[in-house]
Amino acid sequence: SSFKNDEIIICLENISDPGNVGTILRSCDWFGVKTVLLSNDCAELYNPKVLRASMGAIFNLKIFENINLIEKLGELKKANYKIYFADMNGTNYSQINYKQKSVITFCNEAFGPTKELKDVCDEAITIPKKGNIESLNVSAAAAVILSKLL
């Protein structure tokens, strides 16, 4: 497919909040990501809230919508991509070598990654925490992890 040469691909699994989708796309553009795959249950790309939150980033990215993510991740794995997903538990994101071909998946705000996604991924990555709050907003977590790509 047309993005096999990109070193870093970002996937969004079932991220239903349009503000989060738009904000993640904005961060992708900021940190130099070129390609983003959106699963079937993500907010619509042309939802006004997605457009507003993306601040025009959608026009700078290659975005593929309504992707069968599990199938596509399997293909990318065969193309020698390392497949990561952000989760509450996992390897510290800062210890990952993003210089190799990598896919990073961010998942549904409430339910996290599906079992199918976990099964196809190579490794869970996480952002260590110090405080007491239970979780970071998915778009905030994405920005932190994407900053490591620089």
Image: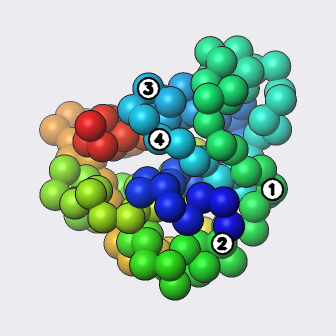
Q: CA distance from mark 2 to mark 4?
A: 18 Å
Q: Disc 3 on helix, strand or loop?
A: helix
Left or right: 86 as drawn, with respect to 2? left
Residue at point 22%, 60% (across, down): 97
Q: Which mark is residue 33?
A: 4
Tell whether label 4 touches label 3 (CB within 8 Å): no
Tell whether label 2 touches label 1 (CB within 8 Å): no
Q: CA distance from mark 3 to mark 4?
A: 8 Å
- Mark 1 or mark 3, which is nearer to you? 3
Residue 23 at what x, y percent from top left? 56, 26
Q: Closest to the observer: 81 or 45? A: 81
Q: Disc 1 on helix, strand or loop?
A: strand
Residue at point 30%, 43% (across, down): 149
Q: Disc 2 on helix, strand or loop?
A: helix
Residue 101 at what x, y percent from top left? 38, 64
Residue 76 at what x, y percent from top left? 55, 74
Q: CA distance from mark 1 to mark 2?
A: 11 Å
Tell whether label 4 touches label 1 (CB within 8 Å): no
Residue 83 at what x, y percent from top left? 44, 69
Q: Could you tell me which quadrant the C terminus lies in?
A: top left
Q: CA distance from mark 3 to mark 2?
A: 25 Å
Q: Quadrant of residue 141?
A: top left
Residue topped by disc 3: 30
Residue topped by disc 2: 72
Q: Which mark is residue 128?
A: none
Whichever of callouts 2 and 4 sits on the residue coming sooner in the sequence is 4
